[in-house]
């Protein structure tokens, strides 16, 4: 088997594992809150982070300010970031560099949710929107997508959805 095919298989495998863990993140937290006798479903947030948006001051400021305004324990349990990088002929093997930079980014901005790197490019289509936040509600038809930078009205709407959902 040629080296290129092995590399593609490794990336595909990494993408499949990432998708599997995202699925576990979504389903595991739901059953856990029901077992603990909570108010039921808590909304989940997936944040698809476009690597290029980390270089945009407006996007970066909106991103950090918004997530630092949310309660850390809630984010730790209900949010997951996925970094989608650029892939092109000049990209090379930049994943280790991205991993190091994203660790520094999380630490410097005191983000309380994990950010995984999509090495398998499973979510590459999501990066075409730029950095975006997806709120997964209790029902299939309650999926909301917001792109950064957020407007103040959008921030209020998101806070209401994630903090108000599940309270009846």
Image (cartoon, rainbow, N blue to C red):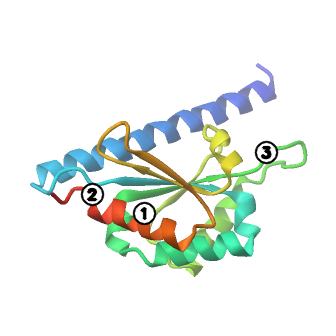
Depth check, front residue: 164 or 8: 164
Residue sitting at the far front: 153
Closer to the chain start, of discs 3 and 2, is 3
Residue in the foreground of this view, choosing between 64 and 94: 64
Residue displayed at 70% across by 46% down: 128
Mark 2 or mark 1: name the one nearer the start of the chain. Answer: 1
Q: Residue at x 59, y 68 (%)?
A: 103
Identify residue for label 2: 165
Secondary structure category for the residue under label 3 = loop
Q: Quadrant of the N terminus?
A: top right
Does dot 1 land on a helix, a strand or a loop? helix
Q: Quadrant of residue 120?
A: top right
Instruction: Provide the residue designation for mark 3.
Output: 87
Q: Which residue is pictured at 56% across the width and 79% down the height?
A: 109
Front position among marks 3 and 2: 2
Q: Which residue is mark 1?
A: 158
Can the viewer see residue 55 in this picture? yes
Question: How dense is the environment of label 3, judged by Cα within 10 Å: few (below 14), some, or many (20 and up)?
Answer: few
Tell me what residue is drawn at x 61 percent, y 46 percent. Answer: 118
Residue 62: image quadrant is: bottom right
Residue 73 pos. (x, y %): 32, 71
Say left or right for 80 vs 101.
Answer: left
In three-dimensional space, the C-alpha distance between marks 1 and 3, rounded to whole angstroms, equals 31 Å
Q: Residue furthest left?
A: 37
Asked if residue 139 lies left or right of residue 135, the reply is left
Residue count near mark 2 (Cα–Cα under 10 Å), binned few <14, some 14–19, many ≥20: some
Mark 3 vs mark 2, CA separation in Å: 37 Å
Residue 32 lies, in percent from the top left, at 20, 50
């Amino acid at each position: 088997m040629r080296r290129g095919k092995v590399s593609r298989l490794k990336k595909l495998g990494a993408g499949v594992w990432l998708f599997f863990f995202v699925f576990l993140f979504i389903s595991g937290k739901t059953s856990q809150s029901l077992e603990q006798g909570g108010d039921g479903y808590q909304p989940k947030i997936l944040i698809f982070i476009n690597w290029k948006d980390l270089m945009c001051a407006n996007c970066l400021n909106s991103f950090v300010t918004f997530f630092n305004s949310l309660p850390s324990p809630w984010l730790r349990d209900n949010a997951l970031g996925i970094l989608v990088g650029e892939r092109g002929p000049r990209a090379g093997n930049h994943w280790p560099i991205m991993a190091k930079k994203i660790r520094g980014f999380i630490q410097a901005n005191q983000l309380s949710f994990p950010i995984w790197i999509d090495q398998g490019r499973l979510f590459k289509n999501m990066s075409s929107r730029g950095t975006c936040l997806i709120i997964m509600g209790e029902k299939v038809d309650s999926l909301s997508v917001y792109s950064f930078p957020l407007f103040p009205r959008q921030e209020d709407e998101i806070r209401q959805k994630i903090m108000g959902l599940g309270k009846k």
